[in-house]
Image (cartoon, rainbow, N blue to C red):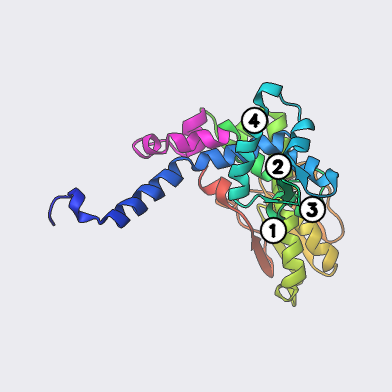
């Protein structure tokens, strides 16, 4: 193959390649802009307003320094463009008003438990959670075990154990995710559980998913199988119990069905 030269690509292909690199290089700006908006409570402010809100009214409700007010416009434009909010003109007003979309409704603090994902999003942007990704190339060149330990000097579970506020955020994030998934599964795919008498939720955490299943199918006896420190002191019921163990080294209890929702934390970090 000939060595690369600028003549290999047409102007159109060059611009497409440039556009892809550009958009990915500033991708983090969108995520951190959304983090900022959540921390400022903007989804809640728009929701409590009861109707689309103008930018000027939104700014007046924010706990920000007056000299930074103009920055809110730029941040919201990024998130409108990304689909997290919508902008429209209401009743012939010159100033656009902002409203929630289906995505930003998941970020409300007082939203229904089955559609709350605020904690899930914020957890994954914690500096310690993001840090391993910044040293991924270095990790690949060394014999270190997990990326999280390489980036933070301790493993993921020790990190949570050392930071009560982070373990709370993590548990809330996982519970919120399970509630949303359970809502969809138990509404659209209830037939999956037909014929089951027993079910093991591997990595089921504090039992959010299992509780939803046993509530809809009282005849199914569910077992939550997770690390000992996760299920310690959790109380079961007639059709729900908790067993401590490691899915990679211990035997999963005998059952008619196994539920595996998310295994990212055990296998990667």
Image disc number at residue 91:
3
Question: Which portion, as a residue range, is magenta?
Answer: 128-152
Q: Position of residue 217 (x, y in %)?
A: 82, 69
- Mark 4 or mark 1, which is nearer to you? 4
Q: Quadrant of the N terminus?
A: bottom left
Q: How many marks?
A: 4
Image disc number at residue 70:
4
- Mark 1 or mark 3, which is nearer to you? 3
Q: Position of residue 93 (x, y in %)?
A: 76, 48
Residue density around tag 1, few if under 14, some if 14–19, many if 20 or more, within 10 Å? many
Q: Is residue 146 magenta?
A: yes
Residue located beneath label 1 in the image: 201
How much space separates mark 2 and mark 4, taking CA atoms? Answer: 28 Å
How much space separates mark 1 and mark 2, taking CA atoms? Answer: 22 Å
Left or right: 203, with 41 as reference point: left
Residue density around tag 4, few if under 14, some if 14–19, many if 20 or more, within 10 Å? few
Taking 191 as reference, is 262 above or below it? above
């Amino acid at each position: 193959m000939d060595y690369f030269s600028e003549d290999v690509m047409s102007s159109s292909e060059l611009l497409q390649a440039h556009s892809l690199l550009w958009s990915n290089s500033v991708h983090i700006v969108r995520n951190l802009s959304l983090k900022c908006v959540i921390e400022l409570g903007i989804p809640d402010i728009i929701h409590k307003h009861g109707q689309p809100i103008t930018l000027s009214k939104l700014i007046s409700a924010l706990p920000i320094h007056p000299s930074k007010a103009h920055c809110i416009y730029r941040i919201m434009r990024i998130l409108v463009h990304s689909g997290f909010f919508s902008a429209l003109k209401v009743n012939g007003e010159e100033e656009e008003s902002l409203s929630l979309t289906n995505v930003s409704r998941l970020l409300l603090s007082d939203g229904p438990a089955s559609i709350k994902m605020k904690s899930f999003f914020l957890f994954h942007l914690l500096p310690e959670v993001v840090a391993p990704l910044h040293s991924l190339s270095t990790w690949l060149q060394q014999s270190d075990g997990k990326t999280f330990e390489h980036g933070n000097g301790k493993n993921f579970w020790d990190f949570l154990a050392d930071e009560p506020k982070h373990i709370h955020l993590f548990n809330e994030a996982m519970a919120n995710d399970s509630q949303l998934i359970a809502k969809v599964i138990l509404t659209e795919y209830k037939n999956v559980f037909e014929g089951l008498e027993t079910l093991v939720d591997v990595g089921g955490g504090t039992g959010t998913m299992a509780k939803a299943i046993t509530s809809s199918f009282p005849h199914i006896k569910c077992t939550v199988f997770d690390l000992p420190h996760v299920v310690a002191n959790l109380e079961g019921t007639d059709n729900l119990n908790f067993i401590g163990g490691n899915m990679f080294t211990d035997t999963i209890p005998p059952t008619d069905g196994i539920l595996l929702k998310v295994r990212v934390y055990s296998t990667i970090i």
